[in-house]
Image (cartoon, rainbow, N blue to C red):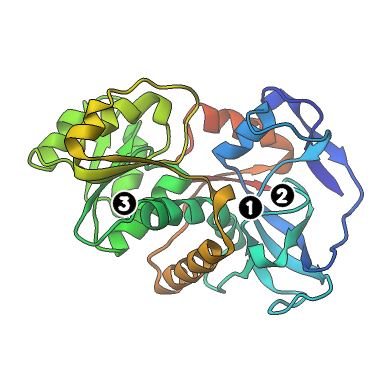
């Protein structure tokens, strides 16, 4: 089978399309014929070595959607032929076949296409964890979703809107802003042309927001703290470097900075996340948006577009 592998840490150019043996599931595992692969910012960090070390070569990717090919021993609740989405893989998702821990695999509703299913595992789960498990979002609160036109951002906008929050979404282009508005944000700020703190201050009548979901903390965290209401929270979903803040901004507002990583989700967290996403899919309040589909061989292009902030919706690779 074909798979994208990394033989050495580096830029997108280190991604190579290799011929590799087809893996077999062990106890508690599932083999999936991969039909669509979700590309995430974390994939670029792994490729670059930020989350190293790893044994070379390795296959990238955590989330995918496809059809169950085989079950290992002790797997229940799934059957060969089921359409499924996977939150995390054992063997790597950037491939024609993937092995997954059965606990990380869920059936995909018939109303959701496989390409959209590949936009669920990491993006929607991260959005839910950021908003509710780490952010403690409550109906009636106001949330600012930074980078709302990406996969995580769109899911956060949809989930927050359905949960009764007032949603402000930021995007970096006119097209991105239109997408964020279409997906349910009450207000949209174009951070490429507008002063975000000033706009948020205007929109909230000077009160500030209760929660910020932050995709690029190294660029925005200092300003985020100044936009918070009393007892507000910033949940850091992504960052690409160091940042300097004024700690007094946390003192005067009694504010929290809360880091999160899906890698830290407990089994109990996953049960909550899966139940919530399943209900949202059935209700139609979670609607994955696929911005671009590329062949598996063009994984490097997908990584460049994510790094450059060009993704509007989820970028999907197709084997």
Q: As drawn, is 54 to the left or to the right of 26?
A: left
- In primary-sequence order, the first of circles 1 and 2 is 1
Tags 2 and 3 touching, CB below 8 Å: no
* Closer-to-camera residue (260/273): 260
Q: Name the residue under label 1.
A: 63
Kindly identify the residue that appears in the image at 51 percent across and 62 percent down.
269
The residue indicated by pointer 2 is 93
Q: In the image, residue 5 lies at what x, y percent?
A: 79, 37
Residue under label 3, please give it: 182
Can you name the residue that lies furthest to the left here?
205
Disc 1 from disc 3: Cα separation:
25 Å
Q: Callout 2 environment at 10 Å: few (<14), some (14 to 19), or many (20+)? A: many
- CB of mark 1 within 8 Å of CB of mark 2? yes
Dot placed on the residue nearer the N-terminal end, 1 or 3 = 1
Q: Name which residue lies at 31% across and 38% down.
A: 170
Does dot 1 land on a helix, a strand or a loop? loop
Q: Distance between the residues labelled 1 and 2?
A: 6 Å
Numbered disc in front, either 2 or 3: 2
């Amino acid at each position: 089978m074909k798979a994208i592998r990394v033989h050495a840490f580096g830029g997108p150019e280190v991604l190579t399309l290799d011929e590799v043996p087809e893996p077999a599931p062990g106890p508690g595992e599932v083999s999936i014929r991969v039909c669509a692969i979700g590309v995430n910012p974390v994939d670029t960090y792994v490729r670059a070595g930020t989350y190293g070390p790893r044994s070379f070569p390795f296959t990238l990717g955590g989330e995918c959607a496809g059809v169950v090919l085989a079950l290992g021993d002790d797997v229940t609740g799934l059957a060969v032929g089921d359409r499924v989405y996977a939150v995390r893989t054992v063997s790597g998702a950037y491939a024609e076949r993937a092995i997954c821990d059965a606990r990380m695999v869920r059936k995909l509703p018939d109303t959701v296409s496989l390409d959209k299913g590949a936009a669920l595992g990491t993006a929607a789960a991260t959005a839910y964890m950021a908003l509710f498990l780490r952010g403690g979002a409550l109906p009636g609160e106001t949330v600012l979703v930074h980078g709302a036109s990406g996969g995580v951002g769109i899911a956060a906008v949809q989930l927050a809107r359905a949960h009764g929050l007032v949603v402000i979404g930021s995007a970096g282009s006119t097209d991105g802003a239109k997408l964020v508005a279409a997906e349910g944000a009450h207000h949209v700020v174009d951070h490429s042309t507008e002063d975000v703190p000033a706009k948020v201050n205007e929109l909230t009548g000077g009160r500030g927001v209760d929660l910020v979901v932050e995709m690029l903390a190294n660029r925005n965290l200092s300003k985020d703290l100044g936009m918070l209401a009393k007892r507000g929270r910033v949940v850091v979903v992504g960052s690409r470097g160091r940042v300097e803040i004024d700690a007094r901004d946390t003192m005067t507002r009694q504010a929290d900075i809360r880091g999160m990583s899906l890698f830290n989700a407990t089994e109990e967290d996953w049960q909550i996340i899966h139940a919530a996403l399943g209900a949202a899919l059935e209700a139609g309040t979670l609607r994955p948006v696929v911005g671009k589909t590329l062949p598996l061989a063009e994984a490097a292009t997908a990584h460049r577009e994510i790094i450059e902030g060009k993704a509007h919706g989820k970028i999907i690779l197709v084997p």
